Image: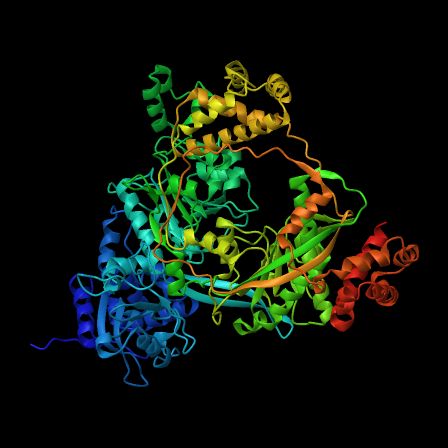
Amino acid sequence: MVFEDNEKRFESDIETYLLTEGGYSKGDQSNYDKERAIDINQLVYYIQETQKRAWTRYEKIYKEEAINRLYKRLNDEIETNGLLHVLRYGITDRGVKLKIASFRPESTLNEKIIKDYQANRLTVTRQFAYSIENNNTLDMVLSLNGIPIVALELKNQFKGQSVENGKKQFMYDRDPREKIFQFNKRILVYFAVDLYEVWMTTRLNGKDTYFLPFNQGSNGAGEVGGAGNPENPNGYATSYLWEKVLQKDSLMNILHRFMHLDVEKKKVIQNGIEKTKTSAKLIFPRYHQLDVVRKLVHHVRLKGSGENYLIQHSAGSGKSNSIAWLAYHLASLHNDNNESIFTSVIIVTDRTVLDRQLQETISSFDHTTGLVETIGENKTSKDLRDAINDGKRIIVTTLQKFPVIYEEVEVNKGNRFAIIVDEAHSSQTGKSAKKLKAALADPVEALKEYAEIEGEEEAKVLDFEDKIVKELLTHGKHKNLSFFAFTATPKQKTLEMFGTKQSDGSFRPFHIYSMRQAIEEGFILDVLQNYMTYKTSYKIAKDTPDNPELPTTQGVKAIRRYGSLHPYNLQQKTAIMVEQFRNITRHKIGGRAKAMVVTASRLHAVRYFFEFKNYIKKKGYEDMDVLVAFSGVVNDGNQEYRESSLNKTKDGNKISENQLKEAFHTDDFNVLVVAEKYQTGFDEPLLHTMFVDKKLSGVKAVQTLSRLNRTYPGKVDTFILDFVNEAEEIKAAFQPFYEVTELDKEIDVNLIYDTKTKLRKYKIYNDQDIEKLNKIYFKDSKQTEKDLGKMASALIPIINRYKELDEETQYEFRVTVRNFNKWYSYITQLTRMFDKELHEEYIFTSYLIKFIPKNKSDQVSIEDKIKLEYYKLEETFKGEIVLEKSSDYVLKNPEKIDTWIKPPEEEDTLENIIQRVNERFEGKFTESDRVIVEGIYKKAVKENEKLRKFARNNDEEIFNRSIFPDVFEKVAQELYIEQMNAYSKLFEDRSFYNAVLDAVAKEAYKELRSE
């Protein structure tokens, strides 16, 4: 017998599985209408079997035309709403409602619905002839009730072909205008499959067809690895496609509860006119998304509520959709007794503006009114309380709204909540998270445990005679709360709180879709591939006869701040950024690429904004414009700046904060300057370049730089230019999150007692002091008008004892109190301590720390005492930062609670502090690096009364263009004679001369007007 290794055998093997184990029957095309792209008889058979009365009524209306009218109405509904909508919600024709497909119910109580589901006719047809134009065939088509919904092109490496050939066949040999291939009209998903890989698309668009990988990952789904699929000892490496995805129950579940139509409206500028562009795409879950939702649902069905789950999925991997799908599945999840496992699913996000995509995705699955309750910006904590008390199935909210309502939520025994946390981080260990638990935790289970430990009869009663017990019950895990935490960058606390404990005591995520796999599969771009670093060197000189003594640390910080905000520094960097953007970035992504400037402070952002505006205007560049993002108000000299007043459209209209993202996406703007804003949770796929002028490390570095990683048609790379961080530092930040992040062991909860012992050694307070305050705090009766005053008064003796300590001991005490409070808060999230005395001490110290005065720290101001003498900006690294593969990163929990005390602040002379700063750059400067701005500025402006009058009596433009240039030229020539080497560059390079002139004129006008 000859061994078959051809494509037909591959087809046959897939068909055999689907027919014998997949729930399909063999299709034939004898009744298939190629022009209509449907086997209408199959649909009629299904309707007659499942909706006999409705069909009889339909036939009475249309008689012998019933089948033709059915097709016409079906086609009209599909043209209007799309096939996916019609499959889910059916059609209505002259009052007759007809289902086109039946979906499996979560509960097994309704036998009719189950019977209807079983009546679905899923067929598999090989070599499917689809065209009225030619004899082309598709290798395999899967149809539902006569409607083709899945197409497969199969390729075989044994015959020298691969998945790439399958993709090309779909792109170049299948006409998207044919009925069967029209978007969301017939086939909903196309798979190119070979022996090793699977790729998928939901829209055929000729050469522009965009395929996504649909692979498990090199080590299997949910595990650490790269692109591809693992070896399958039991068959094909790609068999998961037909065994786990296309199998009847699986495919019907995907059609019902995963696939959705994503409609996006964006404003675009075309020929100077703003238009709204609407685009639609069908979302079919990527394999890691399908896998994580199903594994979580399976685990919850087995274990019930009360478990925590950590999902480490890379940034840009589609977490919003994964969360939406999980929420929808959990909201309707039943156990074996047909009981709902969760009363409500609550999606908690750190983002102030809730992700509208997430809400719309959930809503698209079910037209039931009120299924999703969104507590957005226009709603209050009272709305959240009511939504929980009313048992709304899915609630979307921010964590910040919980503290207000935590005592008002009516929690009865048996209420269970699934809490999905978007971007889980240490915010989940704070007071808001604690109050979230207090709001939702079922006290009955915890009370039982408490009663056993205490052995007190009173603890069995549910009247909470002691409020402290109620607080204690919110600690640790709760049987009625399940947490599902999604993050790309888990920290120690996140891993211990939500991770899965392993047999060796370590903690690991429940499911992993690593940064490495996402990059290798092309879901996201590698932001470290094109990295450039610059080093800024400067030399400061004392510019005062005085030599005052200053606190060393603050003096050094003040000097560095002076250097970083110096106009010359900002101008040099701005020039590099603008020219880099114009030379490289603006040509990317079809000329639509954008850049972000990450600054060190809000003041830096404002000054950079103006530097960009000035440079662009001075150079006459009409293809660039800039926006700025920061919160609150920034004061710079006598000027007050707000984000909304600085950002304006081409027509001069103000751009509000909530319009900024949309404005940045248009072709009018291409650079966004940010300060602690839009560095996380900001998805702008046109963002190609990032200019970094801020120290970044750890999670913050990964989150910030990952803003660039989103894919977009025509976007093939990214670029980062970093003025502050070194390549090795960035590598160290990314490496822990490249594959999987683990935690070595759980925290030793007894460490909190060691810290308590250290606290008591200061002899600032004793048990009587704690008891006095807690009696007021936990009193049984209603709070009176005197209680708050009593609590404050009770702290007076403690504060007085604190004041008697020397400054260094005061500092040590404050650090130890903060450590005690921080670690107690963290530890009690992980486990129930049931230690009244310890909890009372926590309540006491959490109030005490608010009252004890800090050591006075005078602000150091030295701007008028120093000058920038030399400045140098040089490239230090250019290329790819390569992360290491196969290196699982294990975070370490502390062996002891860190109570490190910083040494007392030293004082030193200004001259010595300057010397300390300058030593870093000793011997690096030449005369060409001398900063000449400072010299000209002081010589031209200081004590120039005539110039001051000119500045006060003229507007800035007249001053800068007509008055100051003569003064500048005279002063520059005088200085050139004095220091020829330093000032020669000024007269050798006219553009440099003009740049210095503009900079000095601007600063001079500002200062002379303010005096």
Total labels: the figure holds 0
Q: Quadrant of the N terminus?
A: bottom left
Farthest-out residue, bottom: 134
Residue 184, how many percent across, how many down?
39, 69
Q: Quadrant of residue 653?
A: bottom right
Determine whether, in the image, residue 644 is placed left or right of residue 236.
right
Farthest-out residue, top: 768
Q: Quadrant of residue 118?
A: bottom left
Up-down: is 105 above or below 802?
Answer: below
Up-down: is 551 above or below 75?
Answer: above
Question: Which residue shows up at 73% across the image and 43% down it?
Answer: 910
Residue 438, how many percent across, how many down?
45, 32
Question: Which residue shows up at 74% across the image and 43% down it?
Answer: 861
Residue 372, how many percent across, how many down?
44, 48
Determine whether, in the image, residue 128 is placed left or right of residue 393.
left
Farthest-out residue, left: 1
Q: Nearer the viewer, residue 987 or 852?
A: 987
Residue 822 in view here:
yes
Q: Nearer the viewer, residue 848 or 465?
A: 848
Q: Nearer the viewer, residue 724 or 61?
A: 724
Colouring used for the render: rainbow
Up-down: is 446 above or below 515?
Answer: above
Farthest-out residue, front: 923
Determine whether, in the image, residue 187 is placed left or right of residue 761.
left
Residue 274 in view here:
no
Residue 691, how many percent across, how many down?
58, 60
